[in-house]
Image (cartoon, rainbow, N blue to C red):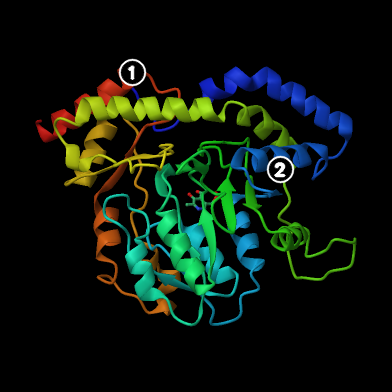
Amino acid sequence: MQVKFFDLKEQNDMVRDEILSEYAKVLDTNQFVGGPMVGRIEAEIASYCDTKYAVALSSGTDALLVALMALDLKPGDEVITTPFTFFATVGSIARAGAVPVFADIDPVTFNIDSDEIIKKITDRTKCILPVHLYGQAADMDAINKIAKERGIIVIEDAAQAIGAAVNGDKAGGVSDIGCFSFFPTKNLGGFGEGGMAVCGDESLYNKMMMLRNHGSSKRYYHEYIGGNFRMDALQAAALGVKLKRLDSYIRMRRDNAHQYFEQLQGVMPESLPKEINGRLHTYNQFVIKVDKRDELKEFLAQSGIGTQIYYPLCLHEQSCFKYLGCARGDFPKAEEVSGRCLALPIYPELTEDEITYVSDKIKEFYRL
Ligand SMILES: Cc1ncc(COP(=O)(O)O)c(C=O)c1O
């Protein structure tokens, strides 16, 4: 049997006709950047997240960059984030002119640990940027409390977690700004690159709207140095069709996760992801933490099963961030997880037989 790590064909076949008819509407409007389709997906995402505003952007990376640029960070301003995330989180902080400051992770959820955040706060801390890793929200109650008491802004990197919940509220919508990615592998995957920033504050919204358009609201007059971070109308049209199905995609991901739990909970409970009460996990990734990770990955590959490592090297160890002065050993929990994590196939259309096959092969490898 072959089990791909990720496969969009079935999902896209189901929406093909609807998307093509939406594309035809875009051709009719003759507006390919911005326009009514983009305005519509902004309104729909704002409504989905229960936020006042949404700004459609060219990628999740650009959503983070634009959100951070809107804060007007000065050289030396610090943004506290996790060292165990995709590069874009930390790259965007540096590109926005601030200093990334790392706080180690909680070993249970692999999300940033709020106690570690407190240790890293200085009078230069301008923002805390938690990441909702793999589709489960970070501890937003604690993080928002820390920030509120000190007048610090919070930006959620919810790139992997649209649809996740924090005490019944939508992840991304429970801080000053929430950032989403619509990269095809995400919970809401577009037909190319795309992103969104949601917020409740009118002035942040207005500034982000200008920043995505070279810092301008009136053509050829520029208040800020922004960029071209706009979303294409065709992208917005495809996302509109898929957004209607997002909750069902998440249900399918959760069903798949629970099948893994059924098959593996009895034999390797310590290796499986943990769901925290009140934080609905969307399982954008299903990541196990195991010994002999690289050997297991190779064994699964030889058995026809695709897996991925998110992420093999922490951000404080990346050569481009050497200037921050961190070293191996500084964030032991993140480092331990990066050496032991392995993402299994979890995409919505995965079948029960495929999950059983993957689980059986894992048991075979460990002779469980
Ligand atoms: C945690 C995290 N942040 C940011 C991004 C960036 O999103 P994009 O690929 O849409 O630029 C990603 C996407 O991979 C991500 O996983």
Q: Position of residue 56 (x, y in %)?
A: 70, 47
Q: Is residue 245 above or below residue 221?
A: above
Q: Position of residue 266 (x, y in %)?
A: 15, 30
Q: Residue at x 25, y 70 (%)?
A: 329
Q: Is residue 360 above or below residue 74?
A: above
Give, as a three-letter code, the residue at label 1: Glu
Mark 1 residue element? helix
Residue 69, image quadrant: bottom right
Q: Residue at x 78, y 36 (%)?
A: 37
Q: How much space separates mark 2 and mark 1, taking CA atoms?
A: 35 Å
- Badge number at residue 42: 2
Q: Nearer the viewer, residue 230 or 142?
A: 142
For label 1, being within 8 Å of ligand 1 is answered no
Q: Is residue 23 above or below residue 110?
A: above
For label 2, being within 8 Å of ligand 1 is answered no
Give, as a three-letter code, the residue at label 2: Glu
Mark 2 residue element? helix
Q: Which residue is mark 1?
A: 352
Q: Position of residue 148 (x, y in %)?
A: 51, 67
Residue 67, image quadrant: bottom right
Q: Residue at x 50, y 81 (%)?
A: 124
Q: Residue at x 24, y 58 (%)?
A: 336
Q: Residues within 10 Å of mark 1 (few under 14, many from 20)?
A: few
Instruction: Name the image quarter holding the N terminus.
Output: top left
Q: Earlier in the sequence, mark 2 or mark 1?
A: 2
Q: Residues within 10 Å of mark 2 (few under 14, many from 20)?
A: many
Q: Position of residue 195 (x, y in %)?
A: 62, 47
Tell me if 136 is positioned left or right of 26 in this view: left
Q: Nearer the viewer, mark 2 or mark 1?
A: 2
Residue 304 in sight from this viewpoint: no
